[in-house]
Image: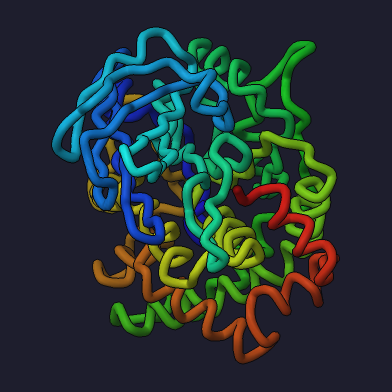
Amino acid sequence: MIGGLALGAAASTSAWRPSYAQVKLPDATASAERLDPRRVHLRWSGVPGPVTVLASSDANAPASLMRVLASDAPGNELTVDVGSAPRPYFLIEGPDGARLRVAERLLPLEAGRNFRDLGGYVASNGKALRWGRIYRSGVMSGLTANDLTYLAELGIETVCDLRSDSEIAGEPPPFSGMNAPRIVTFGYKMEATMASMGALFVAKTREEAVRAFASSYLEMADFLTPHYTDMFARLMRRETPLAFNCSAGKDRTGLAAALILSVLGVPRETVIADYALSEFYVPPDKYIAEMRTPTSQGPDVIPPQQRQLFSRMPDPVLRVMMGTDPEVMQMTLASIDAKFGGPIALAKTRYGLDDVAIDYLRTVYLA
């Protein structure tokens, strides 16, 4: 969802879009970028070489059970052949015992929308969020048969769908069958999201749009209380791997990710960076162009009535609305600080958590 804007499913420009995403670790960084169905390019720093690169389809596999892809690899980057593994997780190991675990952040789906793993982000206690446990995404209705097979191999157990009744009816989740994930929804009307956007419709500048959008996010934190409460409860019950989604996977989903990462102790700059990353995977230019010059080829991504409403916005305002300007999340979190005492305090006030629950979540999802 982009504010009150429902976006339809759209295939990525390539079945193998690059999944570049830097993962910040205490003294090292690593990234994994998909080049094609078999090859992944790894980059790392902070691990003295030469290194050994290992892989497994188990995110938590010990080194002794992982496949060696390269040994005594010099430098700080390497392209590896991952074969037919459904989801490769990598371990980069230096001669001094230093280790980095890394995986692709964006899942290499044929028709996914911003479907990515929250793994790898490092919390203030130095532990990193486990890969392959918590995913965030946009609408899933356009996923192909190959995509559904891929996700089934990942064992996703629960999908928390944050969309409204009309969005779900128009683009229902594509999962079916005995091994389909549990789909969790809570009914509400699209007007609830539109009501929070009033100031954005009269904004004239980027600065006004950022303030208005941040204000709407604060309202989302309120009217999505049932969704976020249930999401945290399912994480407590370890109904994972778990994915949560809205339409574009950036607003309702972006706020949910910010709350989860904050509760797990991930630093604010990383929380904001994860929010901003959506603009890399869902470039706003495509939707802005459609606003101005709708295409006649295939279904419109933006419904006509909404296009009329948003097309009158000045370009700087529309760009804020269609993108993930980091200042929006920065201002949202500052407002949560002022109103509740911070995201953790908000989670305690509204979403059913306490100190014991938070400690438990960190024990389960950080390693």
Residue drawn where x is 79% and y is 41% of the image? 238
State whether residue 262 is above or below residue 78. Answer: below
Q: Position of residue 53 (x, y in %)?
A: 33, 27
Residue drawn where x is 32% and y is 71% of the image? 317
Residue 290 visible, this orientation:
no
In the current view of this chain or complex, which residue is farthest to the left? 75
In the current view of this chain or complex, which residue is farthest to the bottom? 338
- Please indicate whether residue 54 sits to the left or right of residue 116 in the image: left
Q: Position of residue 227 (x, y in %)?
A: 76, 55
Q: Nearer the viewer, residue 187 or 89?
A: 89
Residue 58 visible, this orientation:
yes
Residue drawn where x is 44% and y is 36% of the image? 113
Q: Position of residue 98 (x, y in %)?
A: 38, 45
Q: Nearer the viewer, residue 84 or 16?
A: 84
Q: Nearer the viewer, residue 145 or 191?
A: 145
- Please indicate whether residue 356 sits to the left or right of residue 304 in the image: right
Residue drawn where x is 41% and y is 70% of the image? 269
Q: Nearer the viewer, residue 104 or 312?
A: 104
Quadrant of the rendered image containing residue 325: bottom left
State whether residue 130 is above or below residue 4. Answer: above
